Image (spheres, rainbow, N blue to C red):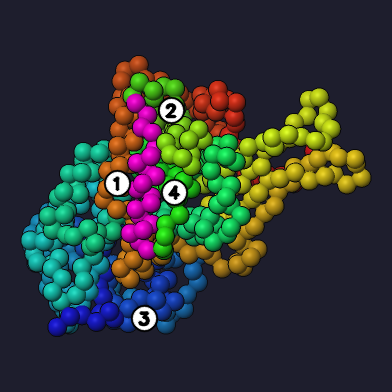
């Protein structure tokens, strides 16, 4: 007998951890409230903390109350909480999987589908998948079995390949959902809609009209309590390998023929293959790495840490569409504001018929996709100042989610991704070869940065990063833009 879609269990490994409490359980609760989970769903947590069902439910409730803005009713909670169960166990201990199997048999009461979520430190991914296989928990005789794997997926190309190889011993690629929460963000999904559901952009979206592209993912937070994970990892592995390069793929990819997971993922991989690798000897010219002042005195950080908390990179893409159009990427912690934005800077008009004062120039058009926090799209253009012959002023055409779609909070990325995995839609998840490819682009940079004479710039917390990152663009006659905070006020 095979499970019906309504009988589905979500198993969270690392259920007593931060990710589970802040994102996964609140996301599942919200999906439950919206009636989007399968009718007969169960959630089973497994972790080493000595909890029982009730402590797991309490942690979930605290998570919902502390980390979301949801106001909910008692009946909504009562519908959700009894479906939460917990097993104490170590990920490497085969007994834990026997106990898990027993718990699943008890709560499922018949054939069920299962979504396993690995919200654990990465060193356990291969071991957990192995143990699931050994315990017979990955066979699909009675229902589907899918596994969501958190980031980081490996720490370089060879470890990502080994991890792929290891999990493929137990699972088909179609059962594996490598998560990148940026792909679950509404505004990130909207990149494809903007590009391919409108006719006005695509004819301009190439080297003929675009001067360059900038991708900024800046954060105000520092390393906080995550030094144990972050120190020695750094921003290139933490943010570029996944989120920032995913954004680059979405901006630069060719239009897929259909809105199908494989078609989308294939185009994203193709564009990554066209990104010109930066050789180690070119790293000094095309990359900047930096650390914020005071990072080394943060709790848990090595006093002589060389870990970068900021990076900026100039990539080239070797294909017909993008030849000669640089892509400047930057991301860092403890910066001036939290902002994720993609700016497309267009070329200047080829000829200006308007009389301009000697020192006056015209600002180029900028199309900025404001991914967060103030979600929207801005288009910077020129307008004539009234009551002048031809004086011009830079204006901003803006669309904001909050104005158009109301004040309903945009759903958390994890909510969408959990639902997609439950529906078997892998469009917004990373394919195995893409994970390896992204590392292939970063490995030579990381290698160059590990040499003794590699420069490590510093920057003031609350600034926009090191001067060296301004120079990276300055040398090309360009500057970083802040297209989402553009002011419409005449100067
Ligand atoms: C995570 C990184 O993947 O993304 C964190 O590990 C980072 O270091 C976070 O803070 C940023 O995500 P968001 O959704 O807040 O932009």
Q: Mark 2 points at which residue?
A: 287
**SS category of the residue bearing label 3:** helix
Task: Determine the CA span between mark 1 and mark 3.
Answer: 38 Å
Q: In this view, does 177 lie above or below 316?
A: below
Label 2 within 8 A of ligand 1 by Cβ: no
Task: Determine the CA span between mark 2 and mark 3.
Answer: 52 Å
Q: Tell me which corner region of the image, top left, top right, bottom left or bottom right, holds residue 134.
A: bottom left
Q: Name the residue under label 1.
A: 435
Quarter of the image that includes the N terminus: bottom left
Q: How many marks?
A: 4
Residue at image coords 48%, 42%? 321
Residue at image coords 50%, 33%? 324
In screen coordinates, is 426 left or right of 249?
Answer: left
Label 1 within 8 A of ligand 1 by Cβ: no
**SS category of the residue bearing label 1:** helix
**SS category of the residue bearing label 4:** loop
Q: Earlier in the sequence, mark 3 or mark 4?
A: 3
Residue that sits furthest to the top in the current view: 453
On the image, the x and y values in percent for residue 52 come to 22, 68
On the image, the x and y values in percent for residue 278 come to 37, 29
In screen coordinates, is 102 left or right of 410?
Answer: left
Q: Tell me which corner region of the image, top left, top right, bottom left or bottom right, holds residue 439.
A: top left
- Image mark for residue 253: 4
Q: Is residue 65 magenta?
A: no
Please rate how many residues cluster around mark 1, counting C-alpha atoms within 10 Å: few if below 14, some from 14 to 19, many from 20. many
Quarter of the image that includes the C terminus: top right
**SS category of the residue bearing label 2:** strand
Identify which residue, 309 or 314, lies in the foreground: 314
Of tags 3 and 4, the one toward the viewer is 4
Residue at image coords 42%, 60%? 257
């Amino acid at each position: 007998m095979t499970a019906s879609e309504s009988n589905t269990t979500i198993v969270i490994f690392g259920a007593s951890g931060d990710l589970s409490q802040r994102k996964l359980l609140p996301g599942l609760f919200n999906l439950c409230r919206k009636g989007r989970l399968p009718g007969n769903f169960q959630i089973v947590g497994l972790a080493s903390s000595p909890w029982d069902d009730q402590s797991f439910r309490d942690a979930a409730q605290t998570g919902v109350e502390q980390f979301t803005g949801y106001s909910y009713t008692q009946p909504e909670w009562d519908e959700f909480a009894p479906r939460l169960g917990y097993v104490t166990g170590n990920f490497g201990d085969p007994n834990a999987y026997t106990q898990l199997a027993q718990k699943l048999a008890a709560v499922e009461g018949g054939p069920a589908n299962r979504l396993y979520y690995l919200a654990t430190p990465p060193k356990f991914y291969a071991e957990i998948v192995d143990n699931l296989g050994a315990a017979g928990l990955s066979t699909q005789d009675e229902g589907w079995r899918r596994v969501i794997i958190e980031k980081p997926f490996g720490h370089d190309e060879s470890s990502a390949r080994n991890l792929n190889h290891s999990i493929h011993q137990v699972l088909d690629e179609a059962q594996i959902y490598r998560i990148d929460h940026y792909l679950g963000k509404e505004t990130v999904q909207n990149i494809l809609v903007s590009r391919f559901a409108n006719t006005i952009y695509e004819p301009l979206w190439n080297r003929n009209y675009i001067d360059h592209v900038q991708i900024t993912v800046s954060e105000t937070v520092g390393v906080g309590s995550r030094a144990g994970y972050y120190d020695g990892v750094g921003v290139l592995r933490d943010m570029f390998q996944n989120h920032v390069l995913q954004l680059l793929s979405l901006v630069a990819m060719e239009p897929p023929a259909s809105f199908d997971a494989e078609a989308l993922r294939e185009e994203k991989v193709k564009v990554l293959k066209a990104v010109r690798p930066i050789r180690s000897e070119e790293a000094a010219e095309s990359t900047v790495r930096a650390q914020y002042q005071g990072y080394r005195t943060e709790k848990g950080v090595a006093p002589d840490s060389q870990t970068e908390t900021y990076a900026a990179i100039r990539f080239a893409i070797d294909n017909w569409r993008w030849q000669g159009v640089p892509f400047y990427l930057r991301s860092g912690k403890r910066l001036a504001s939290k902002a994720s934005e993609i700016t497309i800077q267009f070329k200047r008009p080829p000829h200006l018929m308007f009389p301009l004062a000697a020192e006056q120039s015209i600002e180029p058009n900028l199309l900025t996709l404001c991914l967060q926090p103030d979600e929207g799209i801005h288009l910077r253009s020129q307008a004539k100042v009234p009551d002048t012959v031809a004086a011009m002023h830079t204006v901003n055409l803006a669309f904001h989610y909050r104005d158009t779609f109301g004040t309903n909070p945009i759903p958390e990325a994890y909510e969408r991704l959990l639902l997609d995995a439950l529906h078997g839609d892998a469009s917004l998840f990373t394919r195995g070869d893409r994970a390896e490819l992204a590392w292939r682009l970063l490995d030579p940079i990381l290698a160059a940065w590990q040499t003794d004479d590699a420069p490590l710039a510093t920057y003031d917390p609350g600034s926009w990063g090191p001067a060296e990152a301004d120079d990276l663009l300055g040398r090309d006659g360009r500057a970083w833009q802040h297209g989402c905070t553009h002011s419409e006020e005449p100067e």
